Image (cartoon, helix red, strand yellow):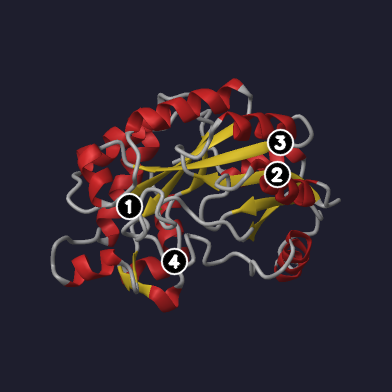
């Protein structure tokens, strides 16, 4: 089944292969520092979803250089996207955000910024800063929505309601940035119909891209405790492939698919263990008729 992949989109946009370098700018999250909560989302690792990012002890420039070294055998174009991945990357005073963003922006090999954040961390000053930067180099803002269902959102301790997401998308589209939304498939107690409803809703909200992430149960998370207590089951391999097929039938051709599975750090993965074989998963997806 054909779909508009991120790799193809980047080649269309920049004329060559472009690689994302994951960064840790040393930010935290309102769901960890006590503003909303202290435990984080129920599925979130200690690294704040930035387990593959560089060390926050390094400067942004140093992280970019180390990231380039790691992928030097995979890319020859010399073009990269600075991916602010760990924790909530608009959750800091605007002067700090400006300093971090511009350090990445001014690197000669960086062609765009990708900023992972929460919809409830996009106040007017942040929107104005993103507008300013987007006029210099393209900006992607990745919003962690995960689900549209409030009961699930409460269970996973997301910490904001759906109307906050709606406003964030409206504000971001108002300044012309590229909006990418994260959806988790396989959240506890959600039916297939629930998941497809989330995908439909997201695709109707004027977004530019979507990330479909299989739920991973990781060590040292509250989700691990509930899983080991038998409170929910994870998706089986065939279930997931079938679900992805239905998602692809829903997603419009103009929406870029940034991810179709995801891979947690293998040393921390509790379940589903089949997801560790990412090549097998992608091969199965790409063979969908």
25 or 14: which is nearer to us? Answer: 25
> Which of marks 3 and 1 precedes in the sequence?
3
Report how far apart the C-alphas of labels 4 and 2 lie in the structure. 32 Å
The 10 Å Cα crowd at callout 1, few under 14, some 14 to 19, many 20 or more, is many
Helix, strand or loop under label 2: helix
Q: Position of residue 153 (x, y in %)?
A: 28, 44
> Which of marks 1 and 2 precedes in the sequence?
2
Q: Residue furthest right?
A: 108
Report how far apart the C-alphas of labels 1 and 4 lie in the structure. 18 Å
Please identify, in this view, whether the residue under mark 1 or under mark 3 is nearer the observer.
3
Please identify, in this view, whether the residue under mark 1 or under mark 4 is nearer the observer.
4
Report how far apart the C-alphas of labels 4 and 3 lie in the structure. 28 Å
Q: Residue furthest top?
A: 174
Q: Say which mark, if any, is on residue 138.
A: 3
Q: Position of residue 253 (x, y in %)?
A: 50, 29
Q: Which residue is mark 2?
A: 95
**Residue 278 versus residue 131 in the image, above or below:** below
Q: Position of residue 5 (x, y in %)?
A: 55, 43
> Which of marks 2 and 3 precedes in the sequence?
2
Q: Is residue 129 left or right of residue 79?
A: left
Report how far apart the C-alphas of labels 3 and 2 lie in the structure. 20 Å
Q: Say which mark, if any, is on residue 126.
A: none
Which residue sits at x=28%, y=65%? 222
8 or 27: which is nearer to us? Answer: 27
């Amino acid at each position: 089944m054909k779909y508009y992949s991120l790799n193809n989109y980047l080649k269309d946009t920049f004329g060559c292969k472009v690689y994302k370098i994951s960064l840790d700018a040393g930010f935290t999250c309102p769901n960890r520092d006590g503003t909303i909560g202290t435990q984080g989302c129920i599925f979130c690792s200690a690294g704040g979803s930035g387990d593959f990012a560089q060390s926050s002890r390094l400067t942004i420039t140093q992280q970019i250089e180390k990231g380039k070294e790691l992928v030097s055998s995979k890319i020859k174009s010399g073009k990269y996207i600075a991916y602010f991945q760990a924790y909530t990357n608009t959750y800091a005073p605007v002067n700090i955000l400006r300093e971090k963003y511009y350090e990445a922006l001014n690197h000669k090999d960086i062609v765009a910024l990708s900023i992972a954040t929460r919809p409830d961390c996009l106040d007017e000053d942040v929107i104005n800063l993103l507008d300013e930067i987007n006029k210099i180099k393209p900006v992607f803002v990745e919003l962690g929505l995960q689900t549209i269902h409030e009961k699930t959102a409460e269970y996973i301790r997301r910490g904001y309601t759906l109307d906050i997401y709606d406003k964030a998308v409206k504000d971001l589209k108002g300044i012309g940035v590229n909006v990418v939304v994260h959806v988790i498939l396989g959240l506890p107690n959600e039916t297939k119909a629930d998941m497809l409803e989330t995908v439909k809703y997201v695709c109707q909200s004027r977004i530019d891209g979507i990330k479909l992430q299989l739920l991973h149960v990781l060590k040292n998370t509250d989700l691990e405790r509930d899983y080991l207590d038998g409170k929910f089951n994870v998706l089986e391999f065939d279930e997931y492939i079938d679900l992805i097929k239905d998602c692809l039938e829903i997603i419009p051709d103009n929406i870029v698919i940034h991810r179709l599975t995801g891979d947690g750090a293998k040393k921390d993965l509790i379940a589903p263990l089949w997801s560790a074989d990412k090549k097998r998963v992608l091969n199965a997806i790409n063979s969908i008729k």
